[in-house]
Image (cartoon, coloured by chain):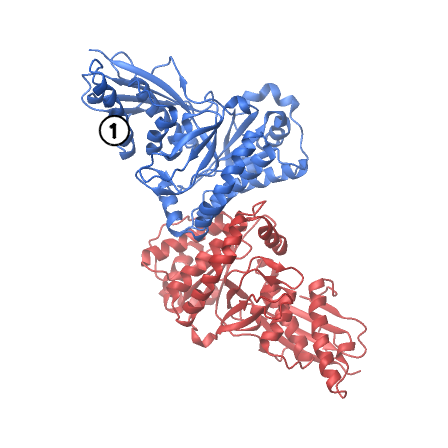
Chain colours: A blue, B red
């Protein structure tokens, strides 16, 4: 039995200009363009191996060590697209093995706890699509592959590039122009760092698709956001990245996070992702910037209470000094133990109990896109190791 | 020594279409029209007595038993306007005593704890302006008087009428067309009841004027709210009141509360008035309406975490039944002790600890406008009793 395998990793990306709202639910076509920063895969990544063989009767999926099977419509749609592209190759070259007719095994693992509530579906779908594309030796460019990942999870398309990434919403009904593109590679502005405060939450958040579509259907302010606010901000943020202007980048990042949560609140019924701890962190960052007289740190919150705080490396002592002062009790600081002596003490007053609402801190930085890897999660039989 | 006195009461009003944003800070001219419900003065009212005498050298103010003096610019502006109108009368009839040249003493008391964080400035300025207007025997109609109260506190103009009240924003630069008018008297729709959940808060809220003007200056979504959302909603809400349509009234009331808090969140820095307890109450009311299959209760939140829940009297057993189930531990229920047997038990599941974030409940209803009163807070010398 010949078993063919390939593996790929994909990073987590955190939007600085938010994707919220679909104009087509099946194709995951958004109501606005978005921008994200790709995070370092040393800290946050999905590793996925794909295997195929003439003996595999059906597609199958193992996630973090557990056999899940291929259940979701979105996963099915991605695999179908990939097999269709493979078939085009096979049709053109009859010497190729008929992967498009065989079952595919997918084995996937995150290097971070899923329980942290960090949106892992973006990295997950990006790695899945990429591993299979590699297995199938598809010649398509990354932006083309991003359209397939997009059908799995909208924001997954942005995880196919490193550095600073834009998802251009496109206009076509079939979504052929709704894809990710690189705004700038990591090397263009490599100083960008991120501190993620994982905020404890006692409630179930509104699921993403349900929440988005409720906002689309019921929020008055949302229509203005997608038509007037975001298009302007999209151009301004790209420019800020191109010019490495952290003040503008940070200002727009914070504004857009708040704008996104504002249209959630304007939905019927209102959707709340920020909790009291999130709000405290927001206030802390504004206090820091106010004291500095300029924006040196910028928060952003996705569809949950976790804070991602961006800052440039040369401000690390100030930013981490402040965060460490009030959140040193939570795990995750060991990574910077050797730097603590340089942390600036801060005289900013803050709720000394706020750390109780935070379960851990993840210190990371901007990172490159998907990587080739020698690690494989499947054995010679095409089953999880 | 002749001392002349007059007294008046004024109610608290709670906006169902929110006032947020000034186009003129000195004149308190709003960026949008608003609508409110006047609450029963048995539960919430300010009583103010005014006294004047040729012997009074200066104006003075006593608030809740404490001499405050006339400090605020807004109080000074109101007194100045009232003296100017009085002077017009004196100029036309020289037999009148020269009140406009004498000091005025103002003594004011609330029948509810100021600590509750219920916006008391509206009732306060309405009663102040009205007591002096009565003392001066001014012939102006209530809408005219409302323009003076507006200069004290914008929403005070709405406390000069009972029932359902609109504050028409007006267009004139001098504010002469920015006044309160009655949408419908109490008798038109007398079944409206209100339960106020006073929510504990550990932080200082952003002051009103600061918050409003920050939103005006920095929120993108705010511009759409005032230009497109509110004008349409203003007409729809007036119609709902005229037609006694609680479903539409309640839907618009909740939407507008959320829209107001959304533009607060969209401000730089973001302004938060709702806390985690407020959000729980919002969810509880949506659950109730969902179970009923129609809107029978509607929340609204001003610039603070307190919830005001409107409902119609014939739904009291359902609405209070649910609220009592989860908040019976807080004080304020004695008033309905005789009705508790009729409260409907609810199978709606809810956070059984939520009551810990609520300090009291105030059960009240829609009420009439300012009342004449025999109660006086000043003695024969024109000093606090």
| Residue in front for this viewpoint, A101 or B2 | A101
**Percent of width and height locating residue A112:** 43, 25
The local secondary structure at tag 1 comes to: helix
Residue extending furthest toward the bottom: B95
- The crowding category of the residue bearing disc 1, from other C-alpha atoms within 10 Å (few below 14, some 14 to 19, many at least 20), is some
Placement of the N terminus of chain B among the 4 image quadrants: bottom right
| Residue at 48%, 51% in the rendered image | B278
Would residue A106 be visible to someone looking at this image? yes
Vertical position of residue A16 compared to residue B315: above or below: above
| Residue in front for this viewpoint, A111 or A333 | A111
Would residue A120 be visible to someone looking at this image? no
**Percent of width and height locating residue A336:** 57, 21
User: Residue A83: which quarter of the image?
Assistant: top left
Give the residue number, with chain letter if any, for mark 1.
Answer: A80
Chain containing mark 1:
A
**Percent of width and height locating residue A104:** 25, 21
């Amino acid at each position: 039995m010949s078993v063919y395998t390939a593996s790929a990793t994909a990073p987590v990306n955190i939007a600085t200009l938010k994707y919220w709202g679909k104009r087509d639910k099946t194709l995951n076509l958004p109501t606005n363009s978005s921008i994200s920063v790709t995070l370092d895969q040393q800290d946050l990544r999905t590793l996925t191996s794909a295997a195929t063989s003439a003996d595999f009767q059906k597609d199958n999926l193992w996630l973090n060590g557990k056999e899940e099977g291929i259940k979701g419509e979105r996963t099915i749609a991605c695999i179908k697209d990939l097999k269709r592209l493979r078939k085009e190759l096979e049709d053109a070259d009859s010497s190729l093995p008929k992967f498009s007719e065989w079952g595919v095994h997918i084995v996937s693992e995150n290097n971070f706890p899923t329980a942290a509530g960090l949106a892992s579906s973006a990295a997950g779908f990006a790695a899945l699509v990429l591993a299979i594309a590699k297995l199938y030796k598809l010649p398509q460019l990354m932006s083309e592959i991003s359209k397939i990942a997009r059908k799995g999870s909208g924001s997954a398309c942005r995880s196919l590039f490193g550095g600073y990434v834009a998802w251009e919403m496109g206009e076509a009904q079939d979504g052929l122009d709704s894809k990710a593109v690189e705004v700038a590679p990591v090397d263009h502005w490599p100083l960008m760092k991120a501190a993620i405060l994982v905020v404890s939450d006692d409630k179930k958040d509104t699921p993403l698709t349900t929440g988005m579509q409720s906002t689309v259907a019921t929020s008055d302010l949302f229509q203005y956001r997608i038509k007037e606010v975001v298009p302007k901000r999209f151009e301004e943020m790209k420019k800020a990245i191109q010019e490495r202007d952290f003040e503008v980048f940070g200002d727009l990042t914070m504004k857009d996070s708040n704008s996104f949560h504002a249209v959630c609140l304007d939905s019927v019924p209102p959707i709340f992702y920020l909790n009291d701890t999130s709000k405290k962190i927001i206030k802390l960052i504004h206090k820091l910037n106010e004291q500095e007289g300029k924006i040196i740190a910028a928060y952003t919150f996705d569809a949950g209470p976790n804070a991602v705080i961006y800052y440039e490396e040369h401000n690390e002592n100030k930013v981490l000094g402040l965060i460490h002062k009030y959140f040193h009790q939570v795990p995750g600081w060991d990574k910077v133990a050797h730097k603590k002596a340089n942390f600036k003490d801060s005289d900013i007053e803050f709720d000394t109990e706020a750390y109780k609402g935070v379960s851990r801190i993840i210190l990371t930085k901007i990172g490159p896109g998907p990587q080739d890897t020698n690690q494989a999660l499947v054995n010679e039989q095409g089953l999880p190791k």
